[in-house]
Amino acid sequence: MFSLSELVPLNQHQSRSKLLKPWWEVFMDYLVVLMLMASVLACTEQLSRDRVVCIPWHPHVPANTSQQQHPAAAGVDVALNPSQKFPEHFPYDMSPDVLQSRGRKTHLVYQQYIYISQVCYHEALPLCSRFFPYMALLQTLILVASGSFWLHFPHTSSRIEHFLAILAKCCESPWTSQALSHAAQQENIQQKELVGERRLLQPAPSLSSESPLLQRSDTGSSAAPPSPCPSNISTTSTTSSASNSSQVHSIKPSVMESPRQVISLDKSDGEQARALFERVRKFRSHCEMSDVIYKVYLAQTIFKLLMVTLIISYTIPLLSSFSFTHTCHPEEQALVGYATFECIHVISSLMRKLVVAYLTLLGLYGLLNVYALSWILHSSLRQYSFHYLKDLCSLTDVPDLRNDLAFLLHMLDQYDPLLAQRLSVFLSPVSESRLMEESFERRWGEEKLRGMISVDADGCSRLQLVALPRLPPGLFTLSQLQVLKLELMTDARFTAQVANMAALRELHLYHCTAAVDQGALGVLQERLEVLHLTFTQPSEIPGWVLSLRSLHQLHLCGRLSSEGGVGRSWALGSIRQLRHLRMLVIRGRLQRIPGELCEVAGSLVRLEIYNEGTRLLVLTGLKRMVDLTELLLQDCQLERLPSALLALTNLRTLDLQHNNLRTLEELLTLAHLRRLSSLRLAYNRVLVLPNSVGVLRGLELLDLSNNQLRSLPPALFSLRHLRRLLLAGNLLTELPAEVKALQLLTELDLSGNRFESLPSELFSNCLELRSLNMAQNSLNSLPREIAALYHLSRLDLRCNSLEELPAELGCCSGLQGGGLLVEEWLFLSLPPQVRDFLSCPFLPSGKCSEDHTRPESDTFPYFSPTQWSFSSALESQI
């Protein structure tokens, strides 16, 4: 036993197949059924009643002699013997042997006539009368099999079934009704605007003439056509009623300006619709590669037409053979005594009528095939355009189709054009983009975006969006957002709604081609202060960047080069409108300073160029930037100090790290840079620091780390304002006693050198020292005068040759809580009281807190966990 539900897929498949059958195919199916019934009836009659009845025929007997005159013809068993006399009127001649026969009555005459009927059935009856019903049945079965061959052919059935399944999904999808409703609304709006324009051009009508206009407006506009799919009837009818109700007020301008109402899909429906778009796209690409369905259907039509022509051509001449009487000449004359018999075919009349009916149905069948063939040959079935649907539903973006998919849609139009309209929704790129937009808006709503906002160390709210197809509309509702980072976006567009982002001041575009509408450009020009651009080619720099007149900082990172003119290659125009630009950062491969910078030289105070190892040859453009206060030229392959620096009299910070500087003899030329306070020359190849460094009287920071210095000139210690001296990574072996002159020194970095000792003058005179880094040297001892450094908060003595530490380190209260960085075994050489003092967390009062737990590792990253646990164990014992 099986349930009726198991038959549902079969019934659904049968009903779906009817969608692709035009009216002539359906009519031909009914004709084939009638032909099949006629052939089956003929076969049944021939199997049950088909026989002939024969009587002897004598040439002297009139043809109209009645059968009743012959006793044998009437079925009377006559026993012939010599004593019996026949009446005189008996016309037949009997042989003497027969007349003199005697014996039992054996019904020999009856058996003779049965025998003759059987013999004459095969000899006198034509072959068409005996076998045509079976031939008609066989022909009809062939027509039945060929009638739907294109639906069941192996190379076409899979495509057809897939097409019907996709069509069913398109009809069931809620997005179909929503898209068609939106198209109908757009069409109604266009009609309303057209009616409104006509009314504005016409004079004001009277009240009597206004009523017909309202009636025409109400009846002329129509909503989306009703759907043949039951799942969408309610939605379509609702849309239609809503559309009709809105047409009554088509004259009012407020209705035309009302926003579009969209029925939002839930998450599952949206995902199914997106999957259906992808499925339709793949099926289209597969079906448009060949036209096998069209060829099979054309071959099927031609085959059926040839079959009909063949059957009619040999059947019509056979109609004359279906006669009622037949003359038989059996060869058994010696047995029956007669040479000729007249035979009657019992079902001859019925058979003739059935053949005529069969040929009539077959003729109609052939005419329908002729019509189908003419339709195929006179119609471009391998090309399909949605012109009718475009006019009906305003779906102007639906692409034209070809080959098998076009043929299937032509066949579908013969059943119902509305089905092709439903499928066109999932062929429309605009419909897909609208679906993606609605799904995108639902996924990236305002609540989710607010949850992604973070606060940086400066207290600014930041939001980072990566690899989104476009900007979510909920982004423009974040009025408190200050920093926006967009990465790897292909279609980011700022609309006029950016005016709602009142706190936006900083924008990052990392490989993001952002476009700005005209309404949003004015807002960004007034509010945006910091802009970061990361790109691959200079052509990706948006043109609207050059019009941000309120911009203070501009960061450019990409393949910037100066080939063919710097201004033409990277600036994409003039930047003279950036009147308030204060800071410019360029990461590229420049060969000279861009000349366009001279146009904003009056406002630019900080210039950073990271040249990625490309040699910067021409720096003459710096001479016009007299107001520049900070200059950074890294990875520019500079071998000498640029002479263009002489013009920068307001320069305060000069950073020439990561270059190829070998000599600093040009330091003497920087004597007139009286405001220079920071000089960074780290990661170069400087061998000797000249005495001319003493002319830089205003220096507060000098960074000569990672060079090849072997000694320090005495003039270095004449820089009385020096606060930070960074000499790590050199070849120094001795620190001169003149270091005592640097009484304002707060940071001294001598790590990575070859020092074996430190002068006591450093600790007795540089009392403001707060950070001392002596890691990776060869120190043998640490002077006890270190106790005078009350402000020392960081002392790094790792990787040295020290055997013990002085107990005077306990006087440096700033080293509490991890300020002392040494090996664990070296730390244990201190007295227990000193260890306890240095191990406890630092308090402003200089006393240890009662809680001796170690602070977090990120607060004191250089204090090893093993060392602190050991110190805590000592405290617990005390």
Image (spheres, helix red, strand yellow):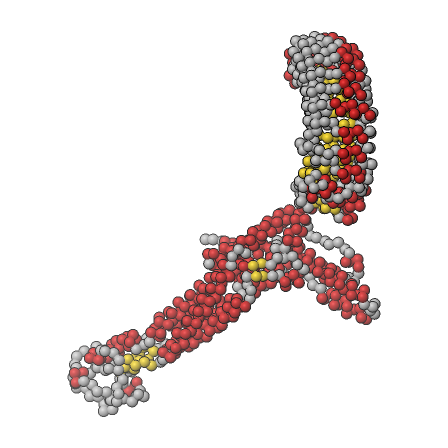
Using the rendered image of the protein, determine whether residue 290 is visible from the camera's viewpoint: yes
Using the rendered image of the protein, determine whether residue 238 is visible from the camera's viewpoint: no
Relative image position of residue 506 (x, y in whole percent): 76, 38
Relative image position of residue 578 (x, y in whole percent): 80, 40
Residue 580's place in the image compared with 294, above or below, is above
Give the quarter of the figure containing the C terminus: top right
Q: Which sits in the foreground, 700 or 403?
A: 700
Q: Which sits in the foreground, 512 or 292?
A: 512
Q: Is residue 261 left or right of residue 321?
A: right
Q: Residue at x 81, y 18 (%)?
A: 720
Image quadrant where residue 57 sits: bottom left
Q: Residue at x 67, y 33 (%)?
A: 614
Image quadrant where residue 402 sits: bottom right
Q: Is residue 487 left or right of residue 423?
A: right
Relative image position of residue 206 (x, y in whole percent): 83, 70
Q: Residue at x 68, y 46 (%)?
A: 491
Residue 14's place in the image compared with 131, above or below, is above
Count of residue discs: 0
Q: Which sits in the foreground, 709 or 95?
A: 709
Residue 581's place in the image compared with 273, above or below, is above
Relative image position of residue 14 (x, y in whole percent): 51, 59
Q: Residue at x 32, y 80 (%)?
A: 326
Image quadrant where residue 196 sits: bottom right
Q: Which sits in the foreground, 524 or 619?
A: 619
Residue 153's place in the image compared with 466, above or below, is below
